Image (cartoon, helix red, strand yellow):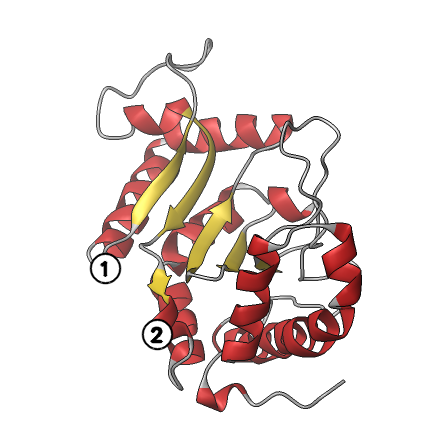
Amino acid sequence: MTTINLDTGFPETALQFLADLRENNTREWFEQSRDRYENDLMDTAVALVETVGTRLQSHFPHVRYDTARNGSGSLMRIYRDTRFSKDKTPYKDRIAMGFPLSEGKKMQVPSFGLQITPDDCGLIAGVLGFSKDQLKQYREAVVDDTHGHALLHAIDTVTQQGDYSIGGTHYKRPPRGFEMPNDERDPYLLHNGLWVSMPAIARAQVTQPDFVDTVVSHFVAIYPVVAWLEEVLT
């Protein structure tokens, strides 16, 4: 693997590969460009996993990261599952990675997530979809006076620090068997996941030397909601 120095920002060569893949999303083109995929994109993505993971561990020692390239670690696979999709393009024109704070299925444990496209970088933190057991735990925590008001405090803390949004609303009606608190907690009973997101980081900033600093600082800022999830889902 080529040594990648992210002190100068995320390389233009990696972004250009994603842009070219967007325009040439076929197996034939990908195979012809496999060296670029491995050297320009994957080497850079692995370096980013390790750099961000190490930096996050300085703030949260229990954060986990894994530099495996086959989809079993922090990096998501670039290959699309087209079995049930009208869009049959075989590859994702982006790289995505996750940094979980506990063991379990990737999408069902509190995690930090990062995605880079040819245009920008998106950040997210939380749980994208609760399991059945987690959903019950979450709802019980929302209606509990101690945990429920701690959630409101965590959300208020996060949203006062920047242009952060809370996601996860799914249901139109509150669940049966859960009495509505009849206060600010009510909307959170309509969730099937809970996460914090932010406006995308523009491509021009992704290639700047402070890119990793920016990513880590945002994750630190939005951690209070993740910490609440860690507490109530364990």
Front residue of 158/114: it is 114
Q: Is residue 126 above or below residue 123?
A: above
At numbered mark 1, what does the secondary structure look like: helix, strand or loop? loop
Front residue of 225/84: it is 84
Circle 1 sits on which residue?
A: 162
Q: Is residue 29 above or below residue 181?
A: below
| Marks 2 & 1, CB-CB < 8 Å contact | no
Front residue of 214/108: it is 214
8 left or right, relative to 97: left
Residue 205 badge: 2
Q: CA distance from mark 2 to mark 1?
A: 17 Å
| Amino acid of disc 2 | Gln
User: How many numbered tags mark residues here?
Assistant: 2
Q: Tell me which numbered mark, 2 or 1, is placed earlier along the sequence.
A: 1
Residue 198 badge: none
Q: Quadrant of residue 212?
A: bottom left
Q: Is residue 90 above or below residue 58?
A: above
Residue at 65%, 66% in the rendered image: 64
Q: Nearer the viewer, mark 2 or mark 1?
A: 2
Residue at 48%, 48% in the rendered image: 126
